[in-house]
Image (tube, rainbow, N blue to C red):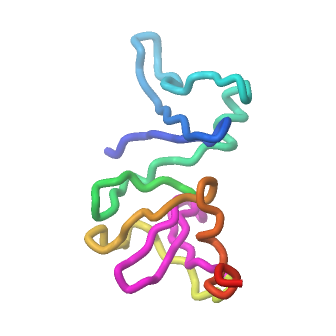
Amino acid sequence: MREIKFRIWLGGKFYYWGFLDDGHGVGFHGLPETNAESLSIPAKMGRSQQFTGLLDKYGKEIYEGDVYKYENGDTYKVVFSGGGFTGQEVPDEFDSGDFELGGINNDYAEVIGNIYENPELLESEDKCHE
């Protein structure tokens, strides 16, 4: 069974949290409140990105919103769609179709950023060089 963990982008950095049983039942733990935003549990859930249960070739955890690259140069964004995690080709304008993320070969995939800290990774090569 994979770990059920999340992260949320608040105040310019990620906070990580998950489901833990503290002896009084399962609850959300590990996400400190910040001065930037005080969010309710439903708001945190709506803005959180889930851990996929997969690691890249360097052992880095892959979360929703991460952008990863294969050694052949293909780049994908991790999204939750249709009840599972998928890799969506970047830039998405090519519409080459999504694929089930569980099918990635972790020996060749490397997380190179995420949609919050590196939004430029979602742009086409042409736009990046203008």
Q: Quadrant of the C terminus?
A: bottom right
Image height check: is 127 above or below 9? Answer: below
Image height check: is 42 above or below 80? Answer: above
Magenta residues span 66-92
Q: Residue at x 37, y 41 (%)?
A: 3
Residue 125: image location, x then y, percent: 61, 84
Q: Residue at x 46, y 30 (%)?
A: 19
Query: Image quadrant of residue 101?
Result: bottom left
Q: Quadrant of the N terminus?
A: top left
Q: Nearer the viewer, residue 110 or 25?
A: 110
Residue 51: image location, x then y, percent: 46, 48
Looking at this rendering, what residue extends furthest in the top direction? 24
Q: Is residue 72 magenta?
A: yes
Residue 33: image location, x then y, percent: 63, 22
The majority secondary structure of the magenta stretch comes to strand
Q: Residue at x 28, y 55 (%)?
A: 59
Image height check: is 93 above or below 76? Answer: below
